[in-house]
Amino acid sequence: MYIIVAGGGKVGFYLARELLEQGHEVLVIEKDGKRADLIQNDLGNVVMVGMADEAATLEEAGAARADVICAVTGDDEDNLVICQVARKRFQVPRAIARINNPKNEEIFRLLGIDETVSSTNMVLAALEQEIPSRNLVPLLRLRHADIEIVEAVIDDSSPLVGVNLRDLSLPRESIIAVIIRRSQPIFPTGTTTLEVGDEVIALTRSAHEDALRSLFFRTARR
Amino acid sequence: MFVVIMGCGRVGARLAQLLTKAGHEVTILDVNDAAFNRLGADFPGTTLLGNGIDMDVLRRAGIERADAFVAATQGDNRNIMASQIAQHVFKVPKVVTRIYDPIRSDTFTELGLNAISPTVLGANAFFERLTGSAPPSSPSS
């Protein structure tokens, strides 16, 4: 793939290096000439000095044939505009934006940039996964489809111990995908019964997460 | 009408003064407190310290009841992002954006922003004063 990396800071540098190692064609656009020289010394002739938010720069970079653009500067507004210009003016199929302020994730989505990466949110998600039991643990969110994959561990206080799945009234648009029991996956049927210690992995719409939580743990709690 | 202006530089401050003189209500934002000195001591509008690309700051500025939003900071991208938030998130009826870069100005005009490019306006004005005739159509894009 041909991948344009806009922004040659730490994120852009390591991203470019990994992508090059994977055999992709990469071009880093960096506005600071000195910084660009440093990258060039390390990664070779894969850097262009310029402002990635200017259409002329993107044109020179060959954005029209790029498969992906990753906007990873330290400024959310720059990353937004870089992605929008790349998508709208050069029809780049995928634009991925780094986000610093987690609140901007929603704004970017509203403005047509679906794929965002927020290190702040990742740390938050990692913290949430540490919350021990009696909660739904978010494993993965497929943002463009508004679906979440969540995990719940059935403890002895759960109202679902000994319940047949077919007797379970799951919230709308939610399914139990797999149950992990003593490290073995069980692909459930209606006659599967839940036991203490089961890890239940479910798919749900974000909107129904609370309903699912109260089904598993009787009271919704965060 | 009630206008929220982001950016209290020369243009933002002057526009704020013009609007309040014409009887409009104005709240003006800037990230730098000293910028408000441009407004003069008798400015009847409201000033607010903060960044207009933050939705909470925009809410505090009263964007939800604003009739118009103006983005006039030095940063094109900040102006573009704040204007899109005003337009698409807060549904402000009238949004006007300063975009220096003519190409970006064209691109985001196509995407529905009401953009003013001082670069284009300035160059055209010079051309007219120098030649006495209207400039040919845009050299860019």
Image (cartoon, rainbow, N blue to C red):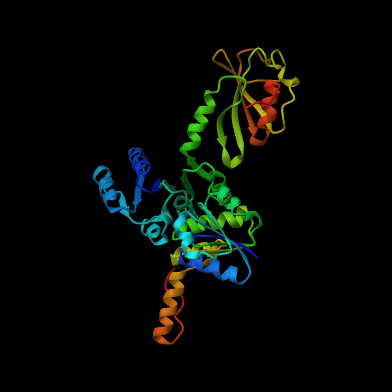
Left or right of residue A60: residue B20: right
Image x and y of residue A84, in percent: 49, 54
Does the rendering let one see residue A143? yes
Q: Residue furthest left?
A: A41
Query: Is A163 or B68 nearer to us in this picture?
Result: B68
Image x and y of residue B122, in percent: 43, 74
- Figure quadrant of the N terminus of chain A: top left
Query: Is A159 or B22 nearer to us in this picture?
Result: B22
**Residue displayed at 34% across by 51% down:** A30
Q: How many marks?
A: 0
Asked if residue A4 is positioned above or below residue B4 in the image, the reply reads: above
**Residue displayed at 67% across by 15% down:** A194
Left or right of residue A186: residue A43: left
- Figure quadrant of the C terminus of chain A: top right
Q: Residue furthest bottom?
A: B132
Asked if residue A59 is positioned above or below residue B138 in the image, the reply reads: above
Image x and y of residue A158, in percent: 68, 16
Does the rendering let one see residue A90? no
Image x and y of residue A94, in percent: 48, 48
**Residue displayed at 34% across by 42% down:** A13
Asked if residue A21 is positioned above or below residue B5 in the image, the reply reads: above
Quadrant of the image occupied by residue A199: top right
Quadrant of the image occupied by residue B136: bottom left
